Image (cartoon, grey):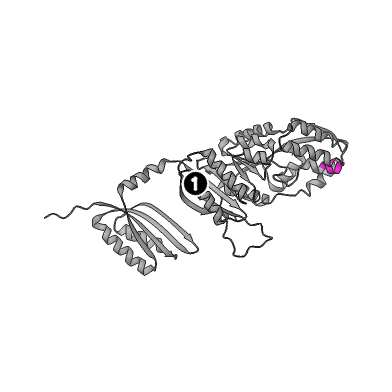
Amino acid sequence: MKGKEPTLELIMVTISGQDHPGVTAAISEILANNDAQILDIGQTDIHHNLTLGILIKTDSSRSGEIMKDLLFKAYELQIKVRFNPIEPADYERWVSQQGKNRWIITMLGRKLTASHIAGVSRIIADQGMNIDSINRLTGRMPLEEKEEALSKSCVEFSVRGNPADYTAMQQSFMQLTKKEEVDISLQEDTMFRRSRRLVCFDMDSTLIQTEVIDELADRAGVGPEVRAITESAMRGEIDFNESFKRRVALLKGLDESVMREIAENLPITEGVERMMTVLKRTGYKTAILSGGFTYFGNYLKQRYGFDYVYANELEIENGKLTGRYVGEIVDGRRKAELLKLIAQVENLNIKQTIAVGDGANDLPMLATAGLGIAFHAKPKVKATAEQSLSTIGLDGILYFIGFKDSFIQ
């Protein structure tokens, strides 16, 4: 009498318990000794607590021996093991989803709460998308927070599927950022996201926490007049070129030496030094594309190692500003052109570029880049740009790219 023919079995093996060296090796060796095929595997470790999942394929003649050996090994290692049978039809449906798009949702702020996680998770679920994994990009948080510390907290969701309504999803994230002190970035996880190589920055109110033309105006005694024009231009209420000409004209007669004094005392934005150190170390090209002035852009280039600077040149005669400028004005249109030009020089696809800025004249550049980030931006800019960063310093863009603190300290 013939015995029963072996049948295919799919088993989800879940290991949990206190982590220590050798657990994964011991489990996988048992599977190898029994010729089990591993279809999928994933492992996480949170505060020395291990969760290891392995989906295996075997036949009914071996499955009993595998489970017995795993149970004995689990007892020996003082961990827990669970077995769940998986129907082949369910597995095939899961495999068929592998071609679906993947998205990266980055959430960051000074600190992240359960409310933040719940809000983002609910929006993802409402769009009919599945969370594949959640990873912490920032270092572990201390139990006692120091008020003087500029803390950062960031987690990254890897999500599979397509949003039922992409615009509605972005709007939901926008509403959440307004309600909570948190930034949320939604990016499709394409090959270009993983190969970005050029980052272009606005200067005033982005790399530095001031508008240099306002500083010059204060020294010239025309601060209120120039500042009013600056604010109106940044809000997009008046044409940038016209505002630029009017402001520069008011600087006539200012001594050239004032620019050096201002440059040496520029208020640098939080995170610039760390960001530039990491970008240079990892081979990124960087550029300053500014509606401000080349004198200050070149100062930052020498201090932090930017590769390119394009800004406006003030005309100087006999050591005094004439109230005129030299060459073409670097306005919003010109910034976008320069971004494309630098990408071409560096032999990059435009999708490999990042642009960061805060004002209305940065919008063309942000829209042109593969990733446009509105940084502590005016309301009009924040509402228009697909990505925004408002809760922490400029080094926050490192998390949008996907860097982890453990890699860049």
Residue 199 appears left or right of 83:
right
Residue 216 or residue 340, whichever sits in front? 216
209 left or right of 404? right
Asked if 250 appears above or below 63 in the picture, the reply is above
Give the quadrant of the N terminus.
bottom left
Which residue is label 1 attached to?
Answer: 124
- In the image, is residue 219 above or below residue 323? below
Q: Considering the numbered disc 1 on the image, is that residue within a helix, a strand or a loop?
A: helix
* Residue at x 41% of width, y 58% of height: 52
Residue found farthest to the left: 1
60 in the magenta segment? no
Q: Residue at x 56, y 37 (%)?
A: 351
Q: Residue at x 30, y 50 (%)?
A: 87
Q: Quadrant of residue 244?
A: top right
The quarter holding residue 173 reads top right
x, y (%) of residue 17? 42, 65
Where in the figure is residue 312, as x and y percent of width and height? Answer: 75, 35
User: Residue 293, can we see it?
Assistant: no
Q: What span is colored magenta in the figure? A: 216-222
Placement of the C terminus among the 4 image quadrants: bottom right
* 174 sits to left or right of 17: right
Q: Is residue 219 magenta?
A: yes
Q: Position of residue 313 (x, y in %)?
A: 77, 35
Amino acid at the residue labelled 1: Ile
- Residue 140 appears at what percent x and percent y? 56, 60
Badge 1, how many Cα within 10 Å: few under 14, some, many 20+? many
| 71 horizontally vs 300: left or right | left
